[in-house]
Image (tube, helix red, strand yellow):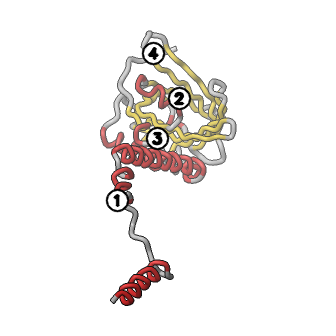
Amino acid sequence: MQKLARREGGDRRRRRSGTGYKEPPLAFTPYLVPILHSPAEKLRTRKGEAMRNTLLRMLAALMCVLAVCADVAPVQDFDLEKMAGKWYIVGFATNAQWFVNNKAGMKVGTAMLVPTAGGDLDLSYANLKDDGTCWRMTHLAKKTDTPGRFTFHSQVWNNDNDMRIVDVVYDDYAVIHTIKTKDGESEVLNKLYSRAPEAIVTLQQKFTQFSNETGILPDNIVILPKSAECPEV
């Protein structure tokens, strides 16, 4: 019996030291689970996902500027003379940081479009500020070989502008799509023009959809509130 016990004990020792033997799981392993799924870990995960989604939206907007937006074509059968006259700028959309910082205080402004004899377009903008003074800016948009497409350099912002009238009903509204380039970087600006100081809901929806399609983030698409006008000069 003693020999049998010694033999069985030796067998157990050999099985432990032999190939294929595995130690039982460590006692502390189950306690790692609550740490990995703690509230702090979950919060960090949610923040990481939110940042990732933001970066993806920014990348989509950038890709639009670099590729898709360059292919936005002007409206067919564009009529320069019918664009003439006074327009209200009732919608504004761009991912530019200056707009993000100032959009809350922006209001409807006016644009006066005057065709030149050579086929260019004189642009005059005016906005009444809160202190009662007027902000004004003018550009001469030069025609291109494509009707409805104009280019100009802004002395105020020191950027180059590729402007296209992409949708228009001459006595009602116009959608203006501009690619602004400065120091090799480009951004999109969409404007909604209206012959009236306010845009109807269907027109707002049309402008919003177009701006989404050209890479503008939803928060940066704004229908501007009404405002008093600057006096004519």
Q: Position of residue 116 (x, y in %)?
A: 62, 31
| Residue positioned 39% across, 89% down in the render | 3
- The answer to which of marks 4 and 1 sits earlier in the sequence is 1
Q: Amino acid at mark 4?
A: Lys
- The answer to which of marks 1 and 2 sits earlier in the sequence is 1
Residue 134, compared with residue 218, is above or below; it is above
Q: Residues within 10 Å of mark 1 (few under 14, many from 20)?
A: few
Label 1: which residue? 30
Label 4: which residue? 129
In this image, 2 relative to 99: left or right? left
For the residues labelled 4 and 1, the Cα–Cα distance comes to 65 Å
In this image, 175 relative to 160: left or right? left
Mark 2 and mark 3 in contact? Answer it, CB < 8 Å. Answer: no
Mark 3 and mark 4 in contact? Answer it, CB < 8 Å. Answer: no
Residue 59 in view here: yes
- The answer to which of marks 1 and 3 sits earlier in the sequence is 1
Q: Which is more toward the observer, 9 or 92?
A: 9
Q: Position of residue 212 (x, y in %)?
A: 43, 47
| Residue positioned 38% across, 86% down in the render | 8
Label 2: which residue? 98
Q: Amino acid at mark 2?
A: Trp
Q: Amino acid at mark 1?
A: Pro
- The answer to which of marks 3 and 4 sits earlier in the sequence is 4
Q: Amino acid at mark 3?
A: Val
Residue 91, compared with residue 166, is above or below; it is above
